[in-house]
Image: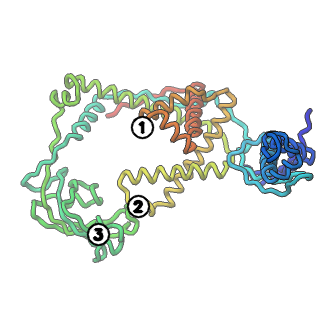
């Protein structure tokens, strides 16, 4: 067996963190210096000498710093990799290196703090239990979906009568809390303090709970005082549990006119007739149920596997995933119209929820990788190409442009991991013990 000239000792800094103390013996150090110096000598162009013919000592002196830098990189990199391989560590983050000793004629010594995937036993993953519902779309489901389609084309007509439940009131209002403008209590809540031509549905839930239903019976031009209590989960924390008082003037009464679901309506949706539209809606709903069923089975199988495993998780992986999830949650809230102030007020809850999800996700990734190794599951080049083609089509960008963007942001590996996880989940479902259960039809 070839001598390695590298000595590594390992100290435990925790279940996921190790300290490697590495020493490269002087013989190896000298051999690397000689090798790199010879390489510089072959390439060196010094005055008075043909390329590659300058004396070795002269080359070593002229390029001393460059030779030392290259030797240091080579020695530390190779010794570190050997130490990781010899101890079969799966490292999840860049090591924290500390140089202790380096120079010609002496052993190289350095320390590397690494974060690793902790060793764990993979439990039985074949025959995991899952319940499969086989729901069928009912006629009531179809009619409900048709009504929702019609709601998308609702028309609001101004009418000269009293407000009724379900109408839309166009109002001007000013709000106070504890006898002061609401902005005195919640400076960012300007929209809750005063608005002109504001649309609110006359029901119990629109705008502020209890506000809309108090408008019933008003006519255009009427004025009324409305009192509310801001709920405990209200988006503006400074107002939760407090009472608000609103002076309201009704500008217009608008009646919602929903189109009839008839033959004309069906043709506007591109269907031959109403029966054809019903069949199309039924098929769409059944596809949604089938997709939901598939997701449910996958979720049950994965959870059944993860519940059998309790392992410490690398902090850097959890933190990276938490940051990513927090970013997505904030983006989703912003797209739904939440203000920066409202999002900031929920910071702790958002972070806690993201971290809990991140821990579960990191755990599943580690477990899936082990299953993939056990079953020989791999991500082939064509798998990646097909996924990138799909993403390019969805985002309406050229394939090569998308690839360059993903490569520059370091996300190619993330996509490959997604594909691997999907393959493993498919395999787990294939191995699963699935039991059909009866679904009670909708009343």
Query: Which one is in front in this view, the residue at disc 3 or the one at disc 2?
Result: 2
Q: Residue at x 35, y 54 (%)?
A: 337
Whether tag 2 and tag 1 are in contact, CB under 8 A, the answer is no
Query: Which one is in front in this view, the residue at disc 2 or the one at disc 1?
Result: 1
Task: Return the mark for residue 340.
Answer: 2
Q: Give the structural element (helix, strand or loop) at label 2.
A: helix
Q: Give the structural element (helix, strand or loop) at label 3.
A: strand
| Residue 86 appears anywhere in the view | no
* Location of residue 366 in the rendering, given as x and y in whole percent from the top left corner: 65, 40
Question: Which residue is more in the foreground, 326 or 2?
Answer: 2
Question: Which residue is more in the foreground, 124 or 268?
Answer: 268
User: What residue does disc 1 label?
Assistant: 395
Task: Return the mark for residue 244.
Answer: 3
Position of 389 with respect to 321 (left or right) is left
Position of 223 with respect to 296 (left or right) is left
Marks 1/3: CA–CA distance: 45 Å
Q: Image quarter for residue 292?
A: top left
């Amino acid at each position: 067996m070839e001598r390695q000239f590298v000595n590594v000792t390992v100290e435990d800094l925790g279940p996921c963190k190790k300290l490697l103390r590495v020493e490269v013996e002087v013989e190896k150090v000298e051999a690397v210096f000689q090798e790199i110096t010879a390489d510089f000598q072959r390439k060196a162009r010094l005055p008075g000498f043909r390329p590659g013919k300058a004396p070795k000592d002269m080359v070593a002196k002229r390029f001393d710093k460059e030779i030392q830098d290259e030797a240091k990189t080579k020695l530390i990199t190779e010794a570190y990799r050997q130490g990781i391989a010899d101890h079969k560590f799966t490292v999840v983050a860049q090591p924290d290196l500390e140089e202790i000793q380096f120079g010609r004629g002496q052993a190289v010594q350095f320390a590397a703090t690494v974060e690793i995937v902790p060793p764990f036993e993979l439990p039985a993953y074949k025959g995991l239990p899952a319940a499969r519902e086989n729901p069928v779309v009912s006629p009531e489901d179809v009619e409900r979906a048709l009504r929702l389609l019609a709601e998308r084309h609702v028309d609001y007509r101004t009418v000269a009568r009293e407000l009724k439940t379900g109408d839309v009131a166009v109002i001007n209002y000013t709000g106070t809390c504890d006898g002061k403008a609401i902005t005195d209590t919640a400076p960012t809540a300007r929209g809750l303090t005063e608005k002109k031509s504001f649309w609110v549905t006359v029901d119990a839930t629109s705008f502020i709970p209890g506000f809309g239903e108090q408008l019933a019976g008003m006519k255009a031009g009427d004025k009324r005082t409305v009192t509310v209590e801001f709920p405990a989960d209200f988006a503006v924390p400074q107002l939760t549990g407090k009472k608000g008082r609103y002076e309201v003037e009704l500008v217009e009464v608008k009646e919602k006119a929903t189109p009839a679901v008839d033959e004309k309506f069906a043709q506007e949706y591109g269907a031959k007739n109403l029966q054809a539209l019903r069949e199309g809606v039924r098929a769409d709903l059944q596809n949604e149920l089938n997709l939901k069923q598939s997701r449910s089975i996958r979720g049950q199988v994965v959870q059944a596997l993860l519940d059998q495993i309790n392992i410490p998780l690398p902090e850097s992986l959890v933190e990276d995933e938490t940051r990513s999830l927090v970013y997505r949650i904030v983006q989703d809230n912003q797209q739904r119209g939440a203000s920066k102030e409202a999002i900031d007020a929920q910071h702790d809850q958002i972070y806690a929820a993201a971290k809990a999800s991140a821990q579960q996700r990191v755990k599943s990734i580690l477990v899936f990788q082990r299953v993939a190794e056990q079953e020989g599951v791999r991500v082939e080049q064509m798998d990646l190409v097909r996924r990138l083609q799909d993403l390019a089509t969805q985002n309406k960008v050229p394939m090569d442009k998308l690839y360059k963007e993903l490569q520059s942001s370091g996300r190619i590996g993330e996509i490959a991991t997604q594909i691997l996880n999907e393959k493993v989940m498919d395999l787990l479902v294939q191995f699963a013990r699935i039991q059909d259960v009866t679904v009670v039809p909708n009343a």
